[in-house]
Structures are given as structure tokens and as C-alpha cells.
Amino acid sequence: MNTRYTRLIAYLGMVALLASLIVGIMGYSSTVSQIEIMRDTLLKRHVTTNIHMVMRYLQMTYGKLIQGEGTLLDKDQNTIEGSVRVVDSILEDLGDHATIFVRIGDNFQRLSTTIANDDERIVGTWLGKEHNAYEYAITGRTYIGEAEIMGVNYYTAYSPITDQNYNVIGLLFVGTPMAALDEMMEVHNQTRSRIDISIIVMRAIALGALIFLISYSLIEQGRQRRAAQEKNNIDANLKKQDD
């Protein structure tokens, strides 16, 4: 085969394998990113659906809540402070943690919750102005996203509780711990990483092997041309001597 065509094929092969290697690396990064987007989308849909369900359940259980002196009152003017019927049902039925807050001044205090510290429910504690959901809650908007509670990361929804005049008098929280999901994602990512890295390594080996074979072939062709040229020179010299 003509040397020029051999080199052309070699270059095209190297370009193709390099492109394949780059695509493999980019594909791995893209897959990880897509998985994270899918995770966030599913979590957002989960807590969005549940916060609406829980808000209806709250109203069915207590009626239209009104603000009392540092507490929330049900339809019979009884405080819901310390009542765990709603939040425990949410945890049991939906698997999500829940908290009911009362607005006191410009902050929110926990009246009822499933979240505990050393088996003691963290009632009486405050949301705090530095919390991710605070600016949403104080202005009557629903916050959906990640939040840290007692050192644990949750994917959460915080929805304002309003009175009949639409004043924000409290806050309802629903959240699912991210640890279990993150662990599952990590296992999946590790498995996928091993597969993708193996593919990339095999492509790299194939590229190296092709470069070696082509280089060897070109070197061998050059050696054969030199040998042929030397033989021709020897034959020409011998012919001159005979003449």
C-alpha cells in the first residue's frame, strides 16, 4: 500500500479513537450531572406533593387555625401545642418528618414535630432568620429545597400557615432525610464510574496499540525501502563492474 495512504489511515484512526476517548470522558460527566438533576427533580416533586397533602390533613384535623398567645388554636379554640397527632401521622403514612411552627414576632417557633434530639422532640426551638426558608416564610411563600436540621440534611418544603385574612401566623414543614438517598446515589455513581473508567481505559489501550502498530508498520516500510534501495545500489555497482 502507498505510504501516503497508510499514514492517512493511521491519522484518521488516531483521530477517531481520540474523539471516542474524549466523548467517553464527557459522557461520564454528563451522566453524573443528569443523575443529580433527576434526583433533585424527584425530591422536589415528592415534597411538593406531600406538603399540599399535609396542609389539607392539617385543616381537616384542626380546622382553620388562628393565632393565640404564642401558639396556634384549632377550631375549638384549643392550643395545638404538644399535639403530635398530625405530625406523627405524616411520618407513619408518608415517611416524612413534619413540624408545625407558630409565628411569634418576626420568627417561627416549633409547636409540634417528629424531629427529636436524644429521643426528645425539639419543640420550643426556633427556625431562625439565617435559615434557608426564612425569607420565603416571612413573606408568605413556600420554600422547597435543602435545609439542615440538627446537623442532618433534609430535602424540604416549608409552607406558610395563614389566617382568614391571609396573614402568616405559622409554618408547616415536611422533609425527607437525604442521607439514605445520597448513599444510594453514591453506590450508583461508584458502579457507573468503574464501568465508564474501564471503557475509557480500554479505549486508551486500543489507541496506544493502534499508534504502536502503525508506527511499527511505517518503520518497517522505511526499513524495507532502505534495504531495497541498498540492494539496487549493489546490483547497479555489480553491473558496472561487469561492464
Image (cartoon, rainbow, N blue to C red):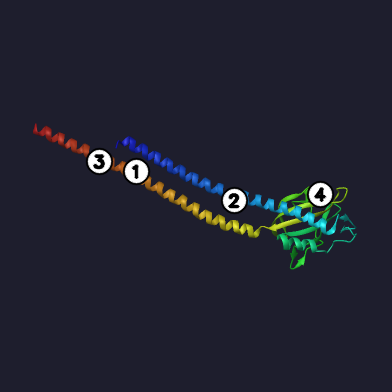
**What residue sits 64% from the left and 60% below the top?**
180
The quadrant of the picture occupied by the C terminus is top left
Characterize the local packing of mark 2: few (<14), some (14-19) or many (20 or more) Cα atoms within 10 angstroms. Answer: some
Q: Name the front one of labels 2 and 3.
A: 2
Work out whether residue 130 can be spotted: no
Residue 242 falls in image quadrant? top left
Asked whether the beta carbons under mark 4 and mark 1 sit within 8 Å of each other, the answer is no
Determine which residue is flagged by label 1: 214
Characterize the local packing of mark 1: few (<14), some (14-19) or many (20 or more) Cα atoms within 10 angstroms. Answer: some
Q: Name the front one of labels 2 and 4.
A: 2
Query: Where in the figure is residue 41, as x and y percent of width and height?
Result: 65, 49
Q: From the viewer's perspective, is 173 left or right of 16?
A: right
Determine which residue is flagged by label 2: 35
Determine which residue is flagged by label 4: 138
Work out whether residue 212 can be spotted: yes
Considering only order in the chain, which callout, 3 or 2, is on the residue closer to the N terminus? 2
Considering only order in the chain, which callout, 1 or 3, is on the residue closer to the N terminus? 1
The quadrant of the picture occupied by the N terminus is top left
Q: Name the front one of labels 2 and 1.
A: 2
Query: Where in the figure is residue 99, as x and y percent of width and height?
Result: 78, 59
Residue 96 falls in image quadrant? bottom right
Characterize the local packing of mark 4: few (<14), some (14-19) or many (20 or more) Cα atoms within 10 angstroms. Answer: many
Residue 224 badge: 3
Q: Give the structural element (helix, strand or loop) at label 4.
A: helix
Considering only order in the chain, which callout, 4 or 2, is on the residue closer to the N terminus? 2
Residue type, label 2: Ile
